[in-house]
Structures are given as structure tokens and as C-alpha cells.
Amino acid sequence: MNVHDSERLAGLLESAGYVPVAEGSDADIVVFNTCAVRENADNRLYGNLGHLYPAKKKNPAMQIAVGGCLAQKDRSVIRDRAPWVDVVFGTHNLHRLPVLLERARHNAAAQVEIAEALEVFPSSLPARRASQHSAWVSISVGCDNTCTFCIVPSLRGGERDRRPGDVLAEVEALVAEGALEITLLGQNVNSYGRSLGDPGAFARLLRACGRVEGLERVRFTSPHPRDFTDDVIEAMALTPNVCPQLHMPLQSGSDAVLRRMRRSYRRDRFLGIVERVRAAMPDAAITTDIIVGFPGETEADFADTLDLVRTARFAGAFTFKYSPRPGTPAAEMDGEVDPAVVSERYERLASLQDEMSWAGNRAQVGRQVEILVSEGEGRKDSETGRLSGRARDGRLVHLLVTGPHAEDGVVRPGDVIETVVTRGAPHHLTADGPLLSHRRTRAGDAWEAARSRGAAGDRTTGEGTAGDGTAGEGTAGAAAGAGRPAVALGMPTMRPSSPASR
Ligand code: 5AD
Ligand code: SF4
């Protein structure tokens, strides 16, 4: 969600006339879009602001803006700790960024503006999409749940659903521009429509996406096990473009811990959903989020988590050490787990999950897979001469382009290929055999057109995996252009995809 908000911020800045600068160049504006879900996000922001201080001192006209969840949480504290920040804005008023920058410049005074409620649904704002072939589409923002560890509801507010017609219009527009894959986004996608008295709305939305001509892959994140009803499983199984993939946060395999987390499902219900999803879609890759060391977690509770992980055979998991968040009920609970015990449990969980992910990936060897080729997902691609992309089930695949389809490097990001998996590693698959097919797509054409305009180079940077269930902070920077400062986008590039790796 934060990554998509960053796309909106970048789009707003571009619409206001700002121009991106290339990565590594000096920018006149730097925007941090922050995350507050765990404590290390706080530390990272203040560290990053400290790093920028010398640049700001050298060039006082440079502007620094901080927005998003941490800004909503810390408000004027950001200015107290880093007085060189020019603009602070929250989660509910992203659209104000250009005005606040302008005002800070004009008045030569910092602007701190935090709204208490959502002012403009972010999806009505322009976006600068990080990828031509895969796009995020918000269906709701905020969350009505009260998980005791989670700071999100207090920073993002209650759930606000977008009208299905608006969601579909955005999906259709994206597909018309070349997108092949969309990921529907919401803090709890399964409660979509409930506030409007329409509990079947999410399943219907999936089916409606199935009727969008040219849309090849539909994913969503994240469902809540409490609200996961069988009509959604049925819609997934019966809608051909909905991918055989599910990211469903578990948090803990212990009923006692789930109760204290105020997650109102129990391990049996979770496993029941996993079973029904597998019955309907035998090849579905199921991934999850797990927190280790929640207050009061005993060795027996943790053993329940390990047991569930073994039974569920997750294709991947984002695992987190519990981090107390101010204002949340869990932060006041007794029973803090000794950090050394948390670390030791974390390692045990991570190695069990690695084992499970690896076994799942080895079982893919010999399978024919369809891959949507992406950009920036293979750290070693330039060394190994491989391309990377995602299979329909969200698994990350590195592949060699050989055989008749290899000529002139014609396979472009956004194109779709078929090949056979030759090796399964813990966090990715390799496919080094000849390509079985290569389909040039509108998304590939769009990528090529953008590259020839010279725009592709600054579209994406870095690795595609966040290694982290929530995308962290993103930064956008800007440098002076024709009368207007310009923006360098250090956009985070967690793609709409599942955590094929932790
Ligand atoms: N401590 C650790 N992990 C957390 N998450 C959310 N809040 C916390 C916290 N206080 C994790 C959950 C959630 C994911 C996005 O982040 O697993 O699903
Ligand atoms: Fe936080 Fe997700 Fe629980 Fe909502 S459902 S309170 S976002 S963990």
C-alpha cells in the first residue's frame, strides 16, 4: 500500500510540473513516504534525514518532505528531531503535497499538515506507475479490525471502500495502457463491501475482473482469515485470470496468542481455508505473515506455530519479530519475551520456512510455467545473463533465454514466455532450458516505447523483493527543471507479487 501511495505522490508531483532526476543525481526535492508498522522504520527515517542534512545545509533551497504513516504518528516531532524538514503530511492528505511544498517555499516556513480523516481517496489522484505490466489498484483504505499489535488502524483510520465501478474503471484504464497484471489492494480485502451491506462484493469484484478483456493476471492482498468466505475461493477457482496464489496472514499458530492478538479466527479455521483453497486450486502457492515473540508467547505457543507452518506448507512467509507500537493494546501487555528467546525462535521459524519453501520449489522442477518477464527482480541477472519474472502462482523465476526465441534479445519486460523449471532454490526457481514460447505483449511494447523515450531508465530501481510484508519507506527526490524543481524517484520496487522469498 505504501509503494502504491508513493506512485501517487510521484504522479502528483509530475502533474504539478516537477521532473524526475536520474538516480544518484542531486535533487531539489526529496520526499520520504514512511512506514510505522515496526519500530525499525522509525529509526530508518531519522537516520535518512540525518544523512540528508549536509546536502540541505549546502543547498538551503532544497526541500525535504516527510509523509505517510510515521508522519501521521510523529507529527511535529519530526520537525523537533529534524528541524531541516520543510513539509510534514500524513496518510489522509497525500494530495496536499504540491501545495505544501509551494507554500513552504513561498512563506520560507515549514508546513506541518496532518488530517484526522481521509480527505481524498488516493485512487482519484494521478499515479506514476513503476511498472507498465503490473499495477496496484486500491479497493479500500484503512481497517476496522483491532489486532492488538497493529498500529495501522490508528494511522490509516477505519475502512473506506471504493465503489466497484470505480475500481473496474481503473482496472480497464490500466489494461488499455498495457497492464497485464493487477493486484487489488486493501488492508482487509475480504471485508470489502460489508460496510455497504454487500458481503459478496469481493467475490463479485474478482469475477468482474475476469471479464476485463486483455487482463491476464489478477492478484489481491491481503485477506483476513476471519472474513475469508467460500464464495471467494469459488470465485478464485472459477475465474481464469485470477492467479493460483494466496497471501493470507497467519500471525501465530497458537489459539491463545491469536486470542490475545484479537485475531478472531483459530488455527483450525486457518488450516480449513488452506485446505479448501488447495482442493479448489491444487497448484496454489500460499504465503503468509508470522509474528514471533508476541507478549506472553510460550515455547508451547511457538511449537503450535511451527506445527502449523509444517502442516500448511507455505510457499513463503514474511516473518517478523514482534515490535511494540505506541498506543496499541499489546504494547501495554505483560509477558515481554526475552529478546534472546525471540531471536532464537525467529531463526528456528525462518529455517523451517526455508526448508518448506525449498521443498515446494524443488517440487516445481520439470513443470512448464508461464512467466511474465519483469525488470529489476534479479539482482544477479546482468552477471548471469538471465532474465527474471513471475510465474502465475507468484514464484520468482530466473531464466536463460536460449533456443529460437533468443534472437536479438527480443524478450522484453512485460512479455510472456513459457519454459520448464530446471532447478528449485529456497527463494526462487531457475529455468535454463529452451523457451517453449514467447509472446510479445502490449506491456512489452509499452516498456519499449518508454525506453526509447528515455523514460524507462528512471522507472525502476533495485530489487523487487521487499523481504518484508509491508513495503518500507520510499523516497522521491527532485531537481530543478524549466522553472520548476524536478523529481528523482527512488521509488521502492516491491512488485505486485507474492513473497516467493522471505
Ligand atoms: N510487530 C511485528 N510485526 C508486525 N506486523 C504488524 N504489526 C507488527 C508489530 N507490531 C506484521 C504483521 C502484518 C505485517 C504487515 O506486519 O505480520 O501482517
Ligand atoms: Fe492491522 Fe491487518 Fe489487523 Fe487491520 S487486519 S488491524 S491492518 S494487522
Image (spheres, grey):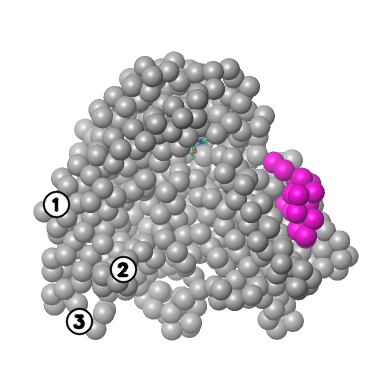
Residue at figure coordinates x 33%, y 21% from the top left: 303
Name the element at disc 3: helix
Residue 190 in view, yes or no: no
Which part of the image, by quadrant, shows the C terminus? Answer: top left
Residue stretch rendered in magenta on the structure = 73-91
Task: Report which quarter residue 447 is drawn in.
Answer: bottom left
Q: Which residue is mark 3?
A: 407
Q: Position of residue 169 (x, y in %)?
A: 50, 56
Magenta region includes residue 75: yes
Residue type at mark 1? Val
Task: Tell whether circle 3 marks a residue whose Cβ is less than 8 angstroms from ligand 1.
Answer: no
Circle nearer the viewer, 1 or 3: 1
Q: Is residue 108 above or below residue 406?
A: above
Q: Which residue is mark 2?
A: 381
- Earlier in the chain: of badge 1 and badge 2, it is 1
Residue at position x 38%, y 19% from top? 299
How far apart are the two marked residues, 3 and 2, measured between alpha carbons?
Answer: 18 Å
The numbered mark at residue 365 is 1
